[in-house]
Structure formats: C-alpha cells, structure tokens
Amino acid sequence: MTESSIQVLYFSWIRETIGSDEEIVALAPTVHTVGDLLAKLCRRGANYQRAFSDPGRVRAAVNQTHVTLDHPVSAGDEVAFFPPVTGG
Amino acid sequence: MTESSIQVLYFSWIRETIGSDEEIVALAPTVHTVGDLLAKLCRRGANYQRAFSDPGRVRAAVNQTHVTLDHPVSAGDEVAFFPPVTGG
Amino acid sequence: MRVVVQADPIDATREYAVVRDRLGGQAGAIVTFSGLMREMGEDGALANMTLEHYPAMTRQELERIAREAQGRWELDEVVVVHRFGTLKPGDEIVVVVTAARHRREAFEAAWFLMDYLKTRAPFWKKETTATGRQRWVDARTTDASAAARWGKTGTRDRPTSANPAGSRRRRGD
Amino acid sequence: MRVVVQADPIDATREYAVVRDRLGGQAGAIVTFSGLMREMGEDGALANMTLEHYPAMTRQELERIAREAQGRWELDEVVVVHRFGTLKPGDEIVVVVTAARHRREAFEAAWFLMDYLKTRAPFWKKETTATGRQRWVDARTTDASAAARWGKTGTRDRPTSANPAGSRRRRGD
C-alpha cells in the first residue's frame, strides 16, 4: 500500500458478490468521502454495482470504526464495506 | 383445632414480638374479616399491640394466599400475619 | 417449569446448564438472574443472613408467579430456585432462568419474576453483623414500585405487546 | 471488564462462576444473557451456522460497547464473550454477564449490551440448512429499534436515572 492508496475490505454477501475480500485502491483526487469511494468502486464492474445496488443495505467503517457515507477518507485509511451486522 | 376455630401463624419480627409462631384462635361471632381478627388479637396483650401497632407494616395471608384486611375469615382457615416480604 | 425452595446452596451454573441442554436449539435466548447475599449490610460487614419463610405458602406462591410469567410471555422454560435458612456473603439467595425464542421475552420475563418475587414470595431476611448484632431487613419501597409497573396479576388475556418494555421511552423523548 | 472473541465453544457457566467467585459478596445481582443458535432457520432445520467477523474491528467495538455500559451504570463487572466460526444448533453465540449492587442496573446493562451488540458488533451469520442450502441472515429491523431506544452513545455525563427503563410505563397508563 502506497502513501496515496487505501485498503478496502468487504464482508459477508458484499464480499461474495464482489468476489474479493480485500484490495488496495488508489486514492483519486475526486475521492474525499466514503460515498465518493463507493461511487468510484461501482465503476469497476457489474459485480460492484450489484453489491452496492441497495444503499440501505450497505454499511461502512473507516479504521475499524462505524461511519456514515459522508465520512472523509484519507491516504492510508482502512475502509470496510459490509451489510448490516447480524451478530449476537 | 375445632370446627369453629382458626389457625393463626406469625412470621419474622411479628412472630418475635408476639413471642409465638402459631396458635389456635376461637372464631368469635364478631370476627368476619382478617381485620376483625387482628383487632381481636390486639386485645390479648401489649405484645400483640406492639406487633400490630403500624398497620402499614403488617401483611396477611388466608390459606396461603396474600389478602387485604377486608378479606373474610371462616372456621378452619389458616391465617398468617407477617411484615412486608424481603425475599429474592 | 421448575420451582424449588431449598436449604442447600443453589448451583446457578447447573440450573442454567440443564435448561440449555434440554432446549438444545429451541430457544434463542436464556436469561439467568442471580440474587446474591452482599457482605455489607446497613450496619456494616455481615457474618451471615437467615431467611425465614412460610413453608406451606412459599412454593405455591412461587408457582403462581412463574405461571403468571408463562401467561404473559411465550417462554420455552421458567426456573425459580429460592434458598432459605442460613446463608453467608456471596451465596446465591435466588436464581431465575427464563428461555425464549428472542431476548426481549427472556429479559422481560426474568425481570418480571424478580420484581414479583421481591414483593410476593413469603421470605424474611435477618442479618447478623460481624459483631453479632441481628436485624430484620426492611422491605425496600423501590421493590413495591418495581412490581407495580408490571400491572395487575391474572391478566393473561392482555396482549404481550402491552407489557412495560414495549412502550418504554427515554425521559424527554 | 472482560471482552473475548473466540472460535472455541463458549462456556457460559464458567463465565458466570468466575464473576460470582471473584466478586464474593460485593454484588447483589448478576445477570447472565446467552444468545443461542436455534435449530430452525427461516428455510427449515439448520445443520450449522458460520459467523464471519471483522477481526481487526470486532474486539475494539465490543470493548467500546462494554465501556459505554460501564459509563451508563455502576457495574461491578461486565463480561462479553462472542463466538465466530462454525456453530451447531444449541451452541452459545454470545454470552454477556453484568454484576451490580441491585438487579435493575444489572438487568438494564445486560439488555443494553445485547441491543447494542446486535447493531454494532461486526458479525455476519450464514446459515446452512439440513438440505445443504446456504443463506446470509438478514438484519432484523426490530434490532435497530431496540438499540435506538437507549439513545445516543458517548453520553456518559447523562444521569443514570435518565435511561429507558427509568421512565417506562405500561401502554395506556
């Protein structure tokens, strides 16, 4: 992971739909928030679009803390996307 | 215990103040309720009066069921007097 | 339903394990409540505590309370075990176990059982301090109000959704 | 405070016994909640269930939730043990133990922990039916509303008396 990239993690059926559990994504100048990152990922292919098609079923964490889509992302962050949790 | 008497039980500090845990009481014609019985017992002596001096701290059961002082008593009943319970 | 009044120490872990093993995947939630003897009384450190009870009444009153809980919630199991006699600090005085499909029913039923038991089960506590003084424990007025919030007994036809936690809100909401 | 995330089966009786023995008369109330895997899923009988989680986040999120409970109630102990990996019906998924002076604090804190954990702990359940079909379990909307009734996180300066059960009333009161 370089200084200008972020690590992205996927869990549960989002992971399965995308077909990957982890990837390094270059931080484009247009990506300021978690929502921007999500939009950028959706341009990667139909599997991403399917995984993120229902925004109501997508949650995110930045550096292991729950956040909303307007949360900022910076180089070196770990960003995770997952469905609403079902533990307990 | 005869047909026209009731069995009276005392618990906790009511038992200790009266100095007895159980006695047979003849059912006088004037005793229709638990409250009537209580009044009759108070005429037996200072220890009974002390035990029952604060009606807010006296509870009763007839035949092992919680009741209020207006509950009727009949020959053959088991009537218990005790302070508010402190189990659990 | 299991209701026990005993002089022997209560084994809360056994009461829980029996319920869990017997239900084997039927219930999704088990709540176990233990009420323990505290080492500090109002007059200082305690040596022990004696629980007097009304033997002819105790068991049937606990059964009434347990049946009342079964009528109010859909429960897979209800266990109430209450001790009497002389206890030492740290001993379990009472153990309640409730099992239900979901956690809300199990939590509400266990809490209800304890609130009811505190105001209805015919037990009286006498504490003995480390210095040998004895004192009957007074009933807490908060116990009466805790029991009152569950409403009247014998209302089995009342829908489960009408119980207290179903409509609770934060103060100021 | 004890927070554990483990692949091994949870021994709820041990978690309880450790708390009871350590507190030895300090706490008057211990609530133990167990969440168990049910044998029936939405699509019929289940063979097993796999709990995926987010290892780097899980433990710290559970610790945040446990600290939040400690900030809201005066607790003598808080234990949260959550399992991951493959479970069979009847297994404990999660065990929460709370100890407090009185039962109200212990009940409220345990219930709060479970409500919060259900909406914040990064776990996802995948069920496998007896016929081999697999399905990700959907989040229950009732879990979100159950968590919401406790109000916002991080409000440690809020008085304890303002928590939900403090002002709860029967519907129609």
Image (cartoon, coloured by chain):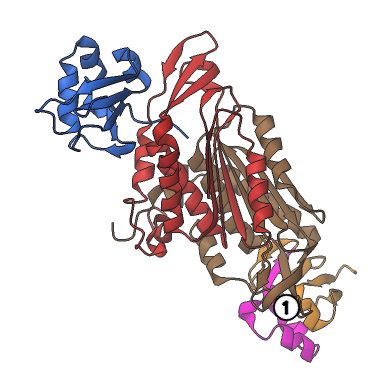
Chain colours: A blue, B orange, C brown, D red
Rendered image quadrant of residue D13: top right
Q: What segment carries the magenta color?
A: B34-62
Residue bearing the label numbered 1 = C135
* Drawn side of residue C89 relative to residue A15, left or right: right
Chain letter belonging to callout 1: C
* Drawn side of residue B52 relative to residue B7, left or right: left
Q: Which residue is drawn at the image coordinates 59% and 23% (left, top)? A: D89
Residue C49 drawn at (x, y percent): 75, 68
Quadrant containing the N terminus of chain C in the rendered view: top right
Q: Is residue B16 above or below residue A1?
A: below
- Judged from this view, the residue extending furthest toward the bottom is B46
Count of numbered labels shown in the rendering: 1
Residue D104 drawn at (x, y percent): 52, 58
Q: Is residue B10 in view? A: yes
SS for tag 1? strand
Q: Which residue is drawn at the image coordinates 61% and 30% (left, top)? A: D9
Q: Which residue is drawn at the image coordinates 66% and 67% (left, top)? A: B86
Residue A7 drawn at (x, y percent): 28, 26
Q: Is residue D114 above or below residue C116?
A: above
Is B40 included in the stretch rendered in magenta? yes
Identity of the amino acid at label 1? Arg
Quadrant containing the C terminus of chain C in the rendered view: bottom left
